Image (cartoon, helix red, strand yellow):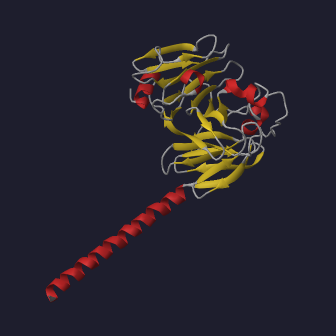
Amino acid sequence: MNIYRHINLKHLLLFCLGLFFAVVCYLIVNVNISKNMTIRKINYQGWEDSYILSNSQVEAVIVPAIGRIMQFRFQGGENAFWEDSQIYGKVPNPKSEEWDNFGGDKTWPAPQSEWESITKISWPPPDTFDSVPLKVEVQENELTLISEVDPFYGIRFYRQIALEPNQPIMKITTTFEKVEGDSQQVSVWTITQFNEPVSVFAAIPQNSIFPQGYNKQSDDLPANLKVQNGILSLTRDEDKAHKIGSDASTLLWVGEKTAVRMDSPRIDKAIYPDNNSSSEIYTNYNPKTYVELEFLGPLQTLEVGGKIDLTVTYTLIKTTSGNIEEEARKILGR
């Protein structure tokens, strides 16, 4: 009996020591993550009470005053997102008939074709979603933007923004919450404006619902549009605006030195806005040299108390090859 008791005590001691070291290792790892993950309040281009999220690799700048994520870049690197420097620091005016195109990443309600019947105007976008300041909640390693309740849609939206620890990845979850009013069919729509691209790509599903891999949403197709071996590619036309929709779950912007891969998985058998498009690409004309990579959630009827959300993952990548298509296929796994 004494021998067995001695053995059991030895096993218990070893177990306790193992548990102790496991807890210590866990705490060390989490302390290191916390050291690398920071959120600081800054004055960004004249907008006070802005924030910069940082980890060991990338940074994101959030400007609640205009309700946008304005920068996504490697530490000390160039911004991938497009910004209109002519209106830095401007306070948005929801009563203006002119639309202030600040740039960056934002959310609007979809479909756009319903705006006029709901808000009585077809353009500019609904005020609450585009041209009023947002509230901010700062957690330990993430930040959430919170809107007022839109008087037309009866919706409050939330944008939860976080960086993955020690990775060049940002994740944004956008949630629409129905607070008041009649039931409304709506979709979460995120719009990200990027700088002049070398090229833009979409990973077309093998069994795409679109015979050509996309659906046309403008009078003319984008410049250099091509679909080959599961990848759609295009460039920006300097003279005209163009737009297409698709059922791709992955979009890719490629610049001179960096690329951004965007992922938001399409839900099988769900119905989407804009001729069943879960992703869209828009290219603008000069002098505003930007393109938009957009994702849409399924169309759903929201009643008071209901919520819908859409998560988009942004991965920042340093390009290494002079062959853009080869680089894109490597990034997209095609």
Q: Is residue 21 found left or right of 267 in the rendered image?
A: left
Which residue occupies 68% across, 23% down? Answer: 113
- Give the residue at the far bottom of this rendering: 2
Q: Quadrant of residue 326?
A: top left
Task: State the image coordinates of residue 86 (x, y, percent, origin top left).
Answer: 78, 31
- Give the residue at the far top of this rendering: 220
Query: Along the line of sight, which residue is nearer the eye, 183 or 15?
Result: 183
Q: Quadrant of residue 11?
A: bottom left
Does residue 228 appear in the picture of this structure?
Answer: yes
Task: State the image coordinates of residue 208 (x, y, percent, origin top left).
Answer: 44, 21
Residue 297 against residue 163 in the figure, above or below: above
Task: State the image coordinates of residue 170 (x, y, percent, origin top left).
Answer: 54, 43
Which residue occupies 61% across, 10% down? Answer: 220
Q: Quadrant of the C terminus?
A: top left
Which residue occupies 62% across, 54% down? Answer: 39
Q: Is residue 225 found left or right of 52 in the rendered image?
A: left
Query: Along the line of sight, which residue is nearer the eye, 167 or 179?
Result: 179
Residue 108 against residue 32 in the figure, above or below: above
Q: How many marks?
A: 0
Q: Quadrant of residue 306?
A: top right
Q: Is residue 172 found left or right of 30 in the rendered image?
A: right
Residue 136 against residue 329 in the figure, above or below: below
Q: Quadrant of the N terminus?
A: bottom left
Task: State the image coordinates of residue 157 (x, y, percent, origin top left).
Answer: 67, 43
